[in-house]
Amino acid sequence: MRRKRKLVLIFLVSVIIIAFFAILIQPSTPTPYKECFLDSCDCQCYLKFEVLEKPKDITSCKTDCKELFNVIGCKYVGLECPYGITACAVVDAINDVFVSKQCEIVKE
């Protein structure tokens, strides 16, 4: 019985410490959770820093997406992270499994 109380106390103290650090490390001014960019080779939107399967010569990709497809940029449409320690990992997993396109094309 005494050991059970000790374990419960340790668990509660751990939860309080984690909650304290979660509040402490939240950004004071929210920054965009994920950013999208328009690829000038294929005029599609991708997550910033997303590794593409086919390496391409960036210098040869100068397609005018606005002129060809009336595309002016991209916007992030996936689920936003609430900036909790574990919440961001959960949101990333949900986005990867259930959200087919996290970036959407913006047309003029």
Image: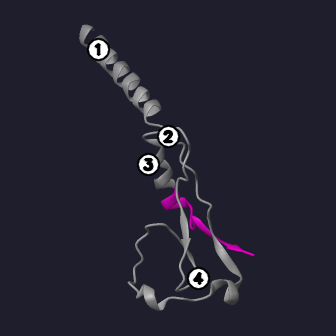
Report, in whole angstroms, how far the alpha carbon at label 4 lies from the one at label 1. 60 Å
Above or below 79: residue 62: below
In terms of sequence position, does the residue under pointer 1 or pointer 3 come before the other? 1
Of residues 63 and 9, the one nearer the viewer is 63
In the rendered structure, find residue 27 and report the number of the disc placed on it: 2
In terms of sequence position, does the residue under pointer 2 or pointer 4 come before the other? 2
Identity of the amino acid at label 2? Answer: Pro
Q: Quadrant of the C terminus?
A: bottom right
Q: Which residue is mark 3?
A: 89
Above or below 47: residue 89: above
Query: Measured from the top left, where is residue 62 in percent x and y?
Result: 54, 88
Identity of the amino acid at label 1? Answer: Lys
Q: Residue furthest right?
A: 108
Above or below 8: residue 34: below
Query: Measured from the top left, where is residue 104 in percent x and y?
Result: 63, 69
Disc 4 to disc 1: CB gap under 8 Å: no
Check disc 2: other Cα within 10 Å, few if <14, some if 14-19, many if 20+.
few
Q: Which residues are magenta?
A: 95-108
Check disc 1: other Cα within 10 Å, few if <14, some if 14-19, many if 20+.
few
Q: Which residue is mark 1?
A: 4
Could you tell me which residue is drawn at 57 percent across and 64 percent down? Answer: 102
In terms of sequence position, does the residue under pointer 2 or pointer 1 come before the other? 1
Q: Which residue is mark 4?
A: 43
Check disc 3: other Cα within 10 Å, few if <14, some if 14-19, many if 20+.
few
